[in-house]
Amino acid sequence: MAGLGGLLFWGNNSASDDDSHVEQLLDRVNNGVLAEDRRSAITELQQVVAESSSAQLAFSAMGLPVLLSVLKEERDDTEIIRGALETLLSAITPIDTVPGQKNEVRPASMNVDLLSRESENISLLISLLSEDDFYVRYYTLQLLTALLTHSSNRLQEAILSIPHGIIRLMDMLMDREVIRNEALLLLTYLTREAEEIQKIVVFEGAFEKLFSIIKEEGGSDGGVVVQDCIELLNNLIRNNASNQMLLKETIGFEPLISILKLHRGSAYNFTQQKTINLLHSLETVDLLLIGGPDADPTKDANRLSNQTAFAQKKILDHLLMLGVESQWAPVTVRCRALRCIGNLVVRNPQNCDALASQLVGEERHSEPALNAILRISLSTSVSQEFVAAVYVFMCFCKKNKDGQLLLASTLTKTTSVAHGNLQDDGNLSFGSMLLQALVTTKNGDLEMCARACSILSHIIRDNIHCKERVLQVKLDEPVPSLGSPEPLIHRLVKYLAFAASSKNKNSNQSNTNGLADSLYIQPIILQLLVTLLADCSDTVHCFLDSPTHLTYLLDLISSPQVSIFVRGLAALVLGECIIYNSSVENGRDAFAVVDAISQKIGLSSYFAHFDELQKAFNSHFAASAPIKPPIRSSSASMLDIQEVEDDGLDQMQDHPILIAVLDSLFVAFVKKLEAEIREKVVDIFNNTKNKAVIVPSELERRDGEIDRDYIKRLKSFAEKQCHDMQDLLARNATLAEELVRTGGSEALEAAAMKPSSGRDRIQLESLRRELHEATKQLEILKMQKAKIEEEANYYQNAAGKLESDLKSLSDAYNSLEQDNFRLESEAKASRKEGNLFHPDVEAIRAEAREEAQKESEAELNDLLVCLGQEQSKVDKLSTRLAELGEDVEKLLEEIGDESGLPDEEEEEDGDEK
């Protein structure tokens, strides 16, 4: 063992000395006779291990078994137990190494692995928590915390396997203050991801103990202990609906709300630690308002229950105080409070109504809370605060049509307010303030307009009545081309073009305001246009009233100087002008938009912008990290205030405006909209603009034309049309398939860019209609032919049956003749004998013949009448079949061969008889 250090540090005299020294000290601890000498040796060992990494390495090879043996067997010697724990703690604490030696062996990590490898070692440490000595318990907790920070999974499993292990740790919360604080840190690390440990901790009364400590420490004004308590509380309720329900049903939310209470007299005192404590408390509120993990089926019910419970405790007042009224509060606190307000009202009609009716400020200067939040979003100079304020409106308007109508109803006709000041007049209504911001271009700055567009997009989303309300808004300045006040949507397109020009002018200038970057203004305005045009044909008509709008969008999509978001969103606006366009006016209908796209851009390039936009969405949301509060490590008890502000919300400084605008609901809508646009474009590309059915003259039946000639002429015409259409149909089918599957191809773009593509499409549709009509006529004639053949077969069967009946009558007549001949023979024989009575045979014969002849004549007359009728029908059918191109003589011969030959043979047999 002594040689291990020498192998790793060959030639280093200091390392060799440390090895020898550590070996000597361990020998004194293990084999010493005097207790004082052993204590002195272990104290010196602790100092050596704490100062030298080579000593730590030597200790890992020789020292762990010795000190673990001391902890097991010498529990009565408190001082040596303290020394052993301190030495172990020093052995697993990393020592700063020389920069550049990344591949150097890390002895502290080796010691952590060796010590936590056996669960018996952890059980031994847990058992030391029951010792009476304060320092023994203190060093044990520190040792367990250090092990947990380096090997959390292994230690969690070991503690769970120890009977009453968690219970002993929970008991430490009721110990002296220093031990309690160390126990808080240890439990915080243990409960971050271990659900089983979370359940045991909650079952042992963690909620009551934590809030008791928070109250004892002074609530939000307390020190780092309050932070540790709230961190532990958040670990217990994060993504755990059952623990959230238990918290609500046991102690309720009142202790949590009391942490957020601000007293106006002391509200200006926001220390660094108070800011951290409030951030963690607001995170707790957020976790409860979310309701649990997405996969939990009870999430929505739990969220609604928690929202209702918070609302009953008047938490909205405290959140508005933190987020809206306390402008002296740190920006991170204000932003987190605004997000909590959003989560409090989302999909909760009662809480939405409460927010809509809530007033903020002093009685004489009070105003609606929504107006105050709108003013913050329009005037703040901090991007994170703008994002948080927009989040409130997004949550308020989500599935809240009544709330959307309430806000939209305040949108009225604007006056000349282009240079108004939102701060000066607190009597403006919500809609007036919003419209004023929409048309404000002070000093050519569209920043306020972009912010207002972002909020308006949430107000009108999925609400046709709100969109109609926006359409009714007219600006005072008349438009020469329209001869009437300018619609708001036309002004937005002007600002969209103005943003591009201002971006070019200011491209080389530095911008001190994080929100005034024109790169974000165009996507925001386009996002509003996409939302406004969705499922609203009236808005599409208003948008296309100006012919320049379509041309500008085509130029914007084709411009390589704009971002992917701008090109993609502009393509979506054009797509909505196709799928939601019900106009029949030339130049403004869906066909005109598709033709303009195919001529100016090309369909494949147009669809490619959708694919680029989706890729940008994916990378955009993948890069946005979730908001996390600052976490205290075991080696630092306090964070710098700048780190507090940077750790959470400043993670969004990468495109902060786009994060506010391109929320998940809008991205999902865009994906659905893209599929509809592709399908509609393909449908328009495959169908003619003129829906009227024009029957070619060749399909009309001529006067006096028989069916056979008419059918032959139709066949000839259809074959000619099919031959002419073959290439066009194959090309069109291929293009349609490619459009659906890949969004376009090079062949499609090349075909679309040809000057004659429109005429080809019209000719193709005309040929298709003619072929369809000819095919339809052929199908009708085939059906008629089949019906006639069926009738002919029926009458042929009937004629066969009548002929069979006639044959039966003939047989009966022959039988009578034979009987008559037999009777005559018998009569002649009787006359020759002369001894019988001789009746008048001739008279009897004449009478019988007369009666038989009458009966036969009656039946024959009936039969001849039927045969005449059937013969007439057969003649007509023969004529019709001849017109249809059938060989009637051949057909009759076949029928005669099937039914007539047997009859002739029977008649010949009868004649022979």
Image (cartoon, rainbow, N blue to C red):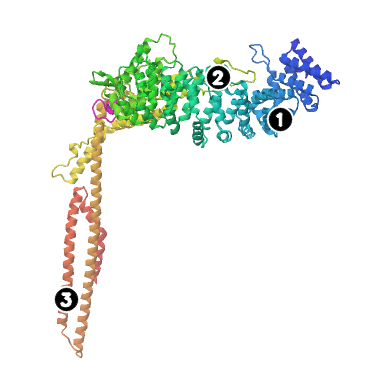
Q: CA distance from mark 1 to mark 2?
A: 40 Å
Q: Identify the main secondary structure in magenta.
A: loop
- Of labels 1 and 3, the one closer to you: 1
How many circles with numbers are drawn on the protein? Answer: 3
Name the residue beneath numbered marker 3.
851
Query: From this viewpoint, is residue 499 visible?
Result: yes
Q: Earlier in the sequence, mark 1 or mark 2?
A: 1
Q: Relative to residue 594, is residue 792 depicted above or below? A: below
Q: Would residue 586 be counted in the magenta stretch?
A: yes
Query: From this viewpoint, is residue 896 visible?
Result: no
Q: Earlier in the sequence, mark 2 or mark 3?
A: 2
Label 1 residue SS: helix
Specify the quadrant of the image occupied by residue 775: top left
Image position of 294 (left or right of 40): left
Specify the quadrant of the image occupied by residue 379: top left
Q: Would residue 825 be counted in the magenta stretch?
A: no
- Of labels 1 and 2, the one closer to you: 2
Residue found at the very far left of the displayed protein? 704
Q: Residue at x 58, y 15 (%)?
A: 640
Name the residue beneath numbered marker 2.
275
Q: Residue at x 63, y 11 (%)?
A: 100
Marking on residue 119: 1
Q: CA distance from mark 1 to mark 3?
A: 127 Å
Mark 2 residue type: Thr
Please name whichever residue, 403 or 547, is drawn nearer the observer in this view of the structure. Answer: 403
Q: CA distance from mark 2 to mark 3?
A: 131 Å
Residue found at the very far right of the displayed protein? 33
Q: Relative to residue 741, is residue 110 depicted above or below? A: above
Mark 3 residue type: Glu
Magenta-highlighted residues? 580-593
Please name whichever residue, 822 or 187, is drawn nearer the observer in this view of the structure. Answer: 187
Return the x and y of residue 508 as percentages of the image width and height.
41, 8
